[in-house]
Image (tube, helix red, strand yellow):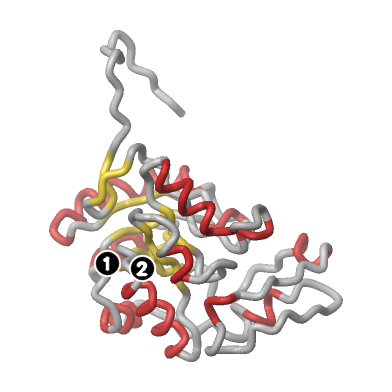
Amino acid sequence: MIRPRILVDISRIDLSTTVLGYKISAPILIAPSAKHKWAHPEGEVATARAAAACDTIMILSYRSTCTIEEVASSCNAVRFFQCYVYKRRDISANLVQRAERCGYKAIVLTVDSPRLGRREKDIKNKMVNPQLKNFEGLVSTQVSTDDGSNIEAFDANTAFDASLSWKDIGWLRSITNLPVLLKGVLTHEDAIKAVEVGVDGIVVSNHGARQLDYVPPSISVLEEVKPLILAVGPACSSQLLDFST
């Protein structure tokens, strides 16, 4: 619900805010989403330039169709990088450290997909992953097809580390000097734990409501999470973000 206040001087409006100390024009960021070349031939490079033009932050997906390096060199802007933790930790470490070398300002760890949700539309449409250039030299990036979606062959049910737990946040911190944000928090209990383990920010997200049935809309969780973060968080400078995807 929006509760409008009346008789407030709105002749000068400033929507700017800061995220991890970086000033942006409005509290609107570009959440990590994969395969932008499906929508535009320039892919994530075009998205990065658009974000820079709007003076906001883009979070590059690990499943981008442009490489970490291509996006970094496309324009001068603040960017974050989103990742998962793989069973082969060297893959995750490679991606994170490349992002740090390329000037990305934070790591956004997605934590809500220890197994991939059953994406029935992808199966029905026989979705085929494009070649993911970020993984060249790390794993096979050959595009394959089958009778349904081939996304599981690459990701959660085979490659992601299903044993990932709170103790592994320390491992991620050990391989990078960048701030770490957790993406996929939906309860006040997990928000408190995130602050206690020292993450730099929390992204309230239900993964676009396509990972787990019956989860609440992200925005409805803010009332539950935000007061606790404000109460516990200042000592460790945690920041709360709300993404619908």
- Category of crowding for the residue at label 1, using alpha-carbon neighbours closer than 10 angstroms: few (below 14), some (14–19), many (at least 20): some
Q: Secondary structure at mark 1?
A: loop
Q: Residue at x 68, y 77 (%)?
A: 152
- Give the residue furthest to the right: 147
Q: Which is nearer the eye, 27 or 183?
A: 27
Q: Position of residue 227 (x, y in %)?
A: 28, 46
Q: Position of residue 28 (x, y in %)?
A: 41, 42
- Front position in the image: 48 or 34: 48
Residue 70 horizontal/vertical position (percent):
48, 67
Residue located at (41% from left, 69% from top): 109
- The residue shown at (48%, 46%) is 50
Is there any visible trace of residue 133 in the rendered image? yes
- In the rendering, at what x and y percent does residue 208 appear? 58, 54
Count of residue discs: 2
Residue at the spot 64% in from the left edge and 60% down from the top edge: 37
Which residue occupies the extreme top position in the image?
A: 7
Residue 179: which numbered mark, if any?
1
Q: Amino acid at mark 2?
A: Ile
Question: Does residue 160 appear to the left or right of 109 in the view shown?
Answer: right
Q: How far, Cα to Cα, is label 2 from label 1?
A: 6 Å
Query: Circle 2 sits on which residue?
Result: 107
Q: Earlier in the sequence, mark 2 or mark 1?
A: 2
Name the mark on residue 234: none
Above or below: residue 57 compared with residue 212:
above
Report crowding for label 2: few under 14, some 14 to 19, many 20 or more residues within 10 A (C-alpha).
many
Which element carries disc 2, helix, strand or loop?
strand
Amino acid marked by disc 1: Pro
Query: Is 151 above or below relative to 38?
Result: below
- The quarter holding residue 200 reads bottom left
Label pair 2/1, CB-CB below 8 angstroms: yes
Residue 184 makes an appearance in the image: no
Front in this rendered view, residue 146 or 76: 76
